[in-house]
Amino acid sequence: MTKKDRIGSVTIHSACGEIRGNERESCLEFLGVPYARAERFAYCESVENWEGTLDATDFGPGCPQNRAWHEHLEHPTRRFYKKEFREGAEYRYSEDCLNLNVFTPKGAKNCPVVLFFHGGGFDSGLNAESPFDGTGLARRGIVTVFANYRVGPLGYLCHEEIRKRYGRDGNFGLDDQLTAIHWVKKHIGDFGGDGENITLLGQSAGAISIQYLCLNGANAGLFRRAAMMSGAGLFPRFALPKRAEDTHAYWLDYMEEAGCGSLEELRRVSLDTLFDAMERMHEKRKDNIYNTMPVIDGLLIPEPVDRLIRHPLPVDTLIGFTNNDMYAPVMAFIGKRYARANGAYVYYFDLDSPGDDNRAFHSCDLRYIFETLEGSWRPYGKRDREVSEELAQYLANFARTGGPNGDGLPLWQKTEKRRGRVLHITPLRTAMGHVHYGKLIGNMLQKGDPKDEI
């Protein structure tokens, strides 16, 4: 997003206090709005007021994360995604990172709300990356909220001392997301949104998080709909959440790398120490990803996921995946299987991104659904813009009514037990069709994700 279409400032009154944001040509934006605060390795507490007028005219900080300390641009994956979403941008990082970016139509009143959780493998990401602009959805009458949450060791460390204090441990990032939902439900009316009509939208790790939130009956009534991009369904058993206590040995090893004999010491060390220790863990262990993600904690994820998934919340559901997703055939299979069991709208994004041979890479559909193609280096053309408009309108319709269909859009039918077709988005048309598993397998074997060249 650029500042060139900001035409002034605007101040609104909220239950938390006054907020000054930006007036843009087609919407209002309020950036870096705090929804919670937390100490290191403690569960967050919701922000319910502030003194004076909150300055929400610029992005807030993101959660400190390993890539900000150890960028590793020698790795193709890191180079690829930096060029794609972060090239030329400067970000701030702070442990006081639990903030929201809110985009609202001018004169909004009781508008549907889309609350977005970014991806990043539970290890990275923030709400200010270049695709994440709610202007397009605001033009379509939707209030859009982009949330930060804690990632990496700050988001998912588990330790018996935490369990003794809270009766649970781990899942700080997942708890942040749940707190954000509660805050938005309570306060979004001050921004013109309808707290009784919330759609959760997430991509990759954000989508997986939403899937877990949909499996907990305690969350019934918090949101009406869930849209999951490249992260819906039940992953293979080895990639499912462990019990929190089964990760304790990993985190004790991490503490030893940080030179800390107690959790209290780890709370006091510098961020440099935290991420240098994580760097050494990455060098010596191959199981990092399976220990630095959500866990079965008895509360947010109360039981093993393969049990919980049999009875998800009865919310309207939309699922998407691309032709060169990470482990593309697996992503497609588990997403379709979940859709057929529960009745969901599924899209198969089979439109390769222009500019290189990386096909429809993992997360390429973000720029389309948020209508931020112009922020990319890629030479997008007429068909790309058509698809972007279609996806944005499908999402707006889904957020408004629970169904994506509307005037001028190709018909999108639910994927159900007796109907396995999906919305197939191709270079030529958007229409109901079938998933080409042979192509997905070929893409995974030939190119895979990450990409080996940019």
Image (spheres, rainbow, N blue to C red):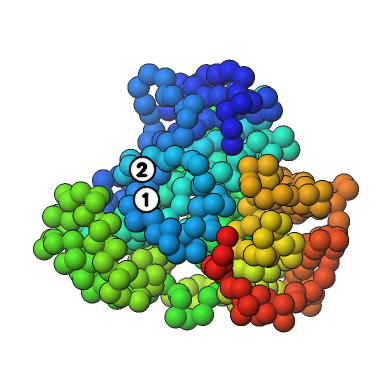
- Above or below residue 306? Residue 4 is above
**Could you tell me which quadrant the C terminus lies in?**
bottom right
Q: Residue at x 65, y 36 (%)?
A: 135
Task: Report if the CB atoms under discs 2 and 1 are less than 8 Å apart.
Answer: yes
Q: Quadrant of residue 166?
A: bottom left
* Disc assigned to residue 68: 1
On screen, residue 77 versus residue 359, left or right, reads left
Q: Secondary structure at mark 1?
A: helix
- Residue 38 makes an appearance in the image: yes
Going by the numbered disc 1, the residue's amino acid type is Ala
Q: Residue at x 13, y 61 (%)?
A: 260
- Above or below residue 141? Residue 441 is below
* Disc assigned to residue 93: 2
Going from N to C along the chain, the mark reached first, 2 or 1, is: 1
Q: Residue at x 86, y 56 (%)?
A: 410
Residue placed most toward the observer, 276 or 109 = 276
